[in-house]
Amino acid sequence: METPNHNPYTIFDEDLYTINWSDIENTEIDYDNYLDEIENFFREDFENDIIEEDIF
């Protein structure tokens, strides 16, 4: 049986990962920018993807 390779005594800073409701409530979504980011992500993924025909 393997022994986990991690420290069980690691200090977890909850404040670092805490989101306040006011942060969410007062956020305005920039839909145009959001959609541009999604489109860019998929475009870059497609351009960097290896085409299956090139493999054979």
Image (cartoon, grey):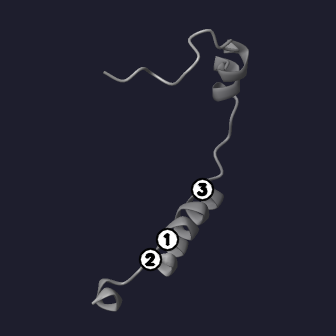
> Front-most of 55 and 43?
55
Residue at point 51%, 25% (across, down) = 5
Q: CA distance from mark 3 to mark 1?
A: 17 Å
**32 relative to 22, above or below:** below
The numbered disc on residue 34 is 3
Q: Residues within 10 Å of mark 3 (few under 14, many from 20)?
A: few
Quadrant (top left/top right/bottom left/bottom right) for the C terminus: bottom left
Q: Residues within 10 Å of mark 2 (few under 14, many from 20)?
A: few
Q: Are marks 1 and 2 in contact (CB under 8 Å)?
A: yes
Say how many tags the image has: 3
Q: Which residue is mark 2?
A: 49
The numbered disc on residue 13 is none
Identify the mark nearer the N-term, 3 or 1.
Answer: 3
Q: Which residue is mark 1?
A: 45
Q: Residues within 10 Å of mark 1 (few under 14, many from 20)?
A: few
For mark 1, give the secondary structure.
helix
> Front-most of 21 and 10?
10
Residue 33: x and y, percent?
65, 59
> Front-most of 12 and 1?
1
Residue 23: x and y, percent?
70, 26
For mark 3, give the secondary structure.
helix
The nearer-to-camera label among 3 and 1 is 1
Q: CA distance from mark 2 to mark 3?
A: 23 Å
* Residue 11 in which image quadrant: top right
Residue 44: x and y, percent?
55, 73
Amino acid identity at mark 1: Asp
Amino acid identity at mark 2: Asp
For mark 2, give the secondary structure.
loop
